[in-house]
Image (tube, rainbow, N blue to C red):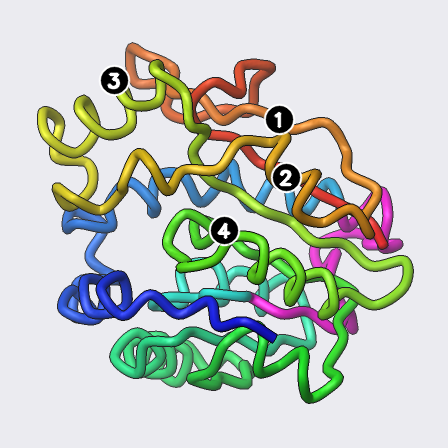
């Protein structure tokens, strides 16, 4: 199976590992995005995985793929997930593990890749890959590995930035260079992935329609929407 590792991307985020849990730091935008991303995951779990109540992922074998410092891993664990979280950066895994230990969360962390886990034959009812696909070296190989990791009837949930002129203007020029919501250079426009590319790269999954994540002005923050031109989320079922 082809490698998905991009050493430059890993180095870029490893250098920022101390900042993962700083809501005012370079990952502040992800902190603000988290409630909306988790709302989408919760709704999927309730609809397709039998989730109920305060612990919609209770007992659900879950993988947080490209977990970074654990911003999604921690709330997934709090939703009751039987959780494994992986990342290719030792520094990011260290930050995630430190937070989880302090919060007394039961998460299995491993510094590895999607393809390595797939080669071991691992499978999960829920695989989340949030804000990671635009940072891998080979999108097709990543989608093949991620698909292999989904158990029959399970879900793969992705979130990323669309490759559109609007996304270039808002997510790269606006968010990185002007508003400083993300580290400048965090995203390479040419590496952004469209919904059609996700569908064609993982034909083994039944893909639902993508849903947009848009910023609402006047302090309303982020919300799910029909506009997928910039940020979007997408789920597929095996």
Q: Nearer the viewer, mark 2 or mark 4?
A: 4
| Magenta span: chief secondary structure | loop
Mark 1 residue element: strand
The location of residue 29, given as percent across then percent down, is: 28, 40
- Callout in the foreground (1, 3): 3
Percent of width and height locating residue 170: 27, 20
Mark closer to the chain start, 4 or 1? 4
Determine the residue located farthest toward the top in the rendered image.
218
Looking at the rendering, the stretch of residues picked out in magenta corresponds to 45-64
Q: Quadrant of the N terminus?
A: bottom right
- The mark found on residue 40 in the picture is 2
Q: Which of pointers 1 and 2 lies earlier in the amino acid sequence?
A: 2
Q: Earlier in the sequence, mark 1 or mark 3?
A: 3
Q: Which residue position is annotated with label 1?
A: 211
Query: Does 25 appear in magenta?
Result: no
The answer to which image quadrant residue 59 occupies is: bottom right
Relative to 166, is 208 on the left or the right? right
Badge 4 marks a residue whose secondary structure is strand
Task: Kindly identify which residue carries mark 4.
Answer: 130
Assess disc 2: are there few (<14), some (14-19) or many (≥20) residues with their C-alpha within 10 Å of its C-alpha: some
Residues at marks 1 and 2 touching, judged by CB atoms closer than 8 Å:
yes
Q: Residue under circle 3?
A: 169
């Amino acid at each position: 199976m082809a490698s998905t590792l991009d050493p430059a991307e890993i180095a870029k985020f490893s250098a920022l590992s101390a900042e993962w849990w700083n809501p005012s730091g370079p990952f502040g935008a992800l902190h603000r995005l988290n409630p909306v991303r988790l709302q989408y995951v919760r709704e999927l779990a309730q609809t397709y995985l039998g989730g109920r109540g305060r612990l919609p992922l209770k007992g659900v074998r879950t993988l947080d793929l490209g977990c970074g410092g654990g911003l999604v891993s921690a709330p997934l664990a709090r939703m009751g997930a039987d959780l494994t979280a992986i990342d290719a950066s030792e520094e990011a895994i260290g930050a995630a593990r430190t937070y989880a230990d302090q919060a007394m969360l039961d998460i299995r962390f491993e510094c590895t890749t999607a393809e390595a886990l797939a080669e071991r034959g691992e499978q999960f009812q829920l695989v989340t890959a949030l804000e990671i696909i635009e940072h891998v070296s080979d999108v097709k190989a990543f989608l093949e590995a991620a698909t292999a990791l989904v158990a029959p009837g399970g879900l793969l949930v992705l979130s990323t930035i669309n490759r559109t002129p609007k996304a270039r203007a808002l997510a790269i020029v606006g968010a990185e260079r002007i508003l400083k919501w993300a580290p400048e250079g965090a995203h390479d426009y040419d590496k952004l992935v469209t919904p059609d590319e996700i569908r064609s790269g993982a034909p083994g999954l039944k893909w639902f329609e993508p849903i947009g994540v848009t910023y609402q002005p006047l302090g309303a923050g982020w919300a799910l929407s029909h506009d997928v031109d910039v940020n979007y989320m997408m789920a597929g079922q095996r």
